[in-house]
Structures are given as C-alpha cells and as structure tokens.
Amino acid sequence: MKITDEILNKLIDNELNKKEIEELHDLIKHDEAALIKVKTHQMVDSVLKKIDIEAAPEDTTAVVMDRISNSLLVNENKNGFIKIIVSSFVFLLVITIGFLFSITDETQADESPSFVSEIINKFVSYFSSIEISFDSNLMLIIGGALTLLFLISGYFMLEEHKSFKQKLENYF
Amino acid sequence: MKNLTELEIIESVKKGNHGDFSLLIDIYKDRAFTLLKKMLKNEMDAEEALQDSFLKAFNSLSSFRQDSKFSTWFYRIVYNTALSVIASKKRKIRMEMSSVEDHFDLGDVDNEIYAKSENSTDYMLKIVDRLPVRNALVIILFYIDNLSLNEISNVLNISLVNTKVLLHRSRNELRELIMKHNYHEELLS
C-alpha cells in the first residue's frame, strides 16, 4: 500500500475497510514518513473540530426583527395606498353611473340615434359649467355616492386596523 | 421563551406569528455569523450580510417546501448573500465549478501567520480564517454545523464529488502547511 491523499482522507472519514486499515497499520510500523503523514492528517482533522463558533453581535435578533417589522409596515402602507386608489375609482364610478341614470330618466322618452352623443354633451357641460344646480335628484345621487364611499372606506379602515392589531399581537 | 421545534417555528411564522422568527434567528445567528466571517474576512460585512440573510429568509419563507432541512435552505441563502457582498466589493471570485481549483495561495501571509502563532493549533485556526471562500464554507459546514457532504453540495449547488474534493483538498493543503513548518515534530515527541 502507498500512502496517498485519498487513503488519508478515507481514513479520516472512516471509509477504509478492515483489510485496508490493517495494511495501513503495517505500513506505518515500518515507514516513519508514512506515520508522520497519517498523524499530521489526523491532527488537521482534530484541530478543525475545535473551530470555535463566534458569537454574533448581541443585538442581531432585535435589529433583524426591527427590519422585518419595518418592511411589513412598508407593505401595509403600499396596500393601504392601493386601497385608497381603488376606493377613489369606485367613488368616481358610482358618481358617473348615478349621473348617467339621472340623465337617462330625463331623456327616457327620447329614442333618437343621437341619444349617446346627447348624454356625452350633457356630461361634458355638467362638469365644465361653473354653476351646478343642486336639485333634489342630484343631491340624492351625491349623497348616495358619499354614503357608499364612507361605507367602503370604513370597511377598509376596519380591516386595516384588525390586521395591524393582529400583527402587533403576533410580534410581541 | 417558547419551546418549539424548527418546523413548528416555521409553520407558526407562515401562519402570521412573525415574532416567532426571532427563535430561528437565535438558533442560527452564531453559526451563520461564523460562516460569514470566514467567507468575507471582515466583521462589518459579516454583520450586514447576516442581517440581510435573515431578512431574505423571512421574505421567502413561504417558498420553503420542507423537502430539505431548513439549515440547508438557510445556508444556501447565507452563501448567496455572501457571494453578493463579495461581488459588490469586486473581490476576486470564480463562480464556475466545472473543476475545483481553489488553491491556497497564501504567499507571504503564511510566514506572517506562522511568526505570530503560538503553536500548531493556533497556526491552523489562523490559516482557516484565510481559506478561500468555498473551502472555508465546506470546512465550517462540515465541522461546525455537522452537515453531510450531500447537504453541503446542495448549499453550494455543486456536485457531491466536487464538494468532497473541496473538503479533501482543504485537509491536504493544511497538512502540507503543518509539515512545512515542522509542527508535526511535536506529534512524534
């Protein structure tokens, strides 16, 4: 048998069979250079087992948890922003639909092909006119839309509050 | 302090109990820090990379499928984070692993370390601090974290054979250094 790196590593990893171990023992009895190699290789293995685990900075856990809670808050804010945007769109949609309904009531009898263009003209003139006549129907539509908006916003706020409270409880 | 197993902690965090993630940090912070210090050779970089690794682990915990051990999954994140730090600092690193060629090129540093070392153990531990990145990683995961070679190969994303070659070459090179400085004589006395 010849001492090779492979044999030495197999020895350390307990991968030599009984016959190979006996051959190795015979060899190191008569060959001092081989004995030195084997012992040095075993020494390397035993020293590597002594490598100390170094302590991470004491505040590591606190710092990481802070960063995690901050990133969660940022995500919350992003979600909140998206909800506000969605609410605004819903609000605008409700107003638009309400307005169209109010116009449709007035022009119900009119079945002429210019019906759509008339609606658009009224819609444009409605928003471009400085003086908006607050008749009872319009007030009803705006009131309804606002109520719906408040209900939707209230729902989102309640959900936000509940999830934030849950997160706080989980965190502590 | 809660007494949960690793998998229970992970499940708890996945369910929304984010505070339980601190238990995982406490389990792994010291070993991951040791690993990062050996890889990055710089305490400040290691601290920052440690925090980033935990943050990445938290953010992608939902993708942890439990088909491997958490330690293997987490150390892969640590290893990749360390590689990013090294790359960002433009240190020399070769990602390709078609062949294993991580030689110890210590040059004058070896003599410097030898001069400052009190004995063979002290010398070897100082040399381990200077090991090339992947050699250091294999040594730490094998000797400190008791990961199998198969698990280490998963962390490094290299073959089992190459992982074994890295470990064996590290031992062989260390042995040669010990013999070069005649430290082996104390073994025979």
Image (cartoon, coloured by chain):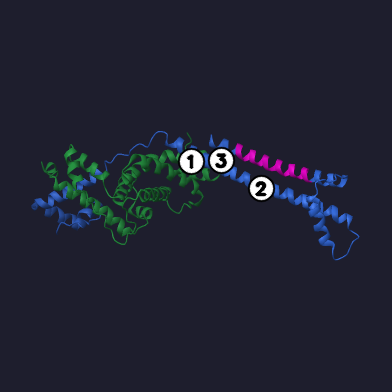
User: Looking at the rendered structure, which numbered label has been put on residue A73?
Assistant: 3
Q: Are marks 2 and 3 in contact (CB under 8 Å)?
A: no
Q: Quarter of the image containing the C terminus of chain B?
A: top left
Inspect this view and state whether residue B28 appears: no
Residue position for label 1: B21
Seen in the image, is B80 located left or right of residue B117?
right
Tell me what residue is drawn at x 68 percent, y 43 percent: A156
Separation (CA) of disc 3 from disc 1: 17 Å
Separation (CA) of disc 2 from disc 1: 33 Å
Does A5 appear above or below A45? Answer: below
**Which residue is farthest right?**
A109
Closest to the observer, A53 or A62: A62
The secondary structure that dominates the magenta segment is helix
Tell me what residue is drawn at x 55 percent, y 37 percent: A170
Task: Name the kind of residue labelled 2 in the image.
Answer: Ile
Residue position for label 2: A85
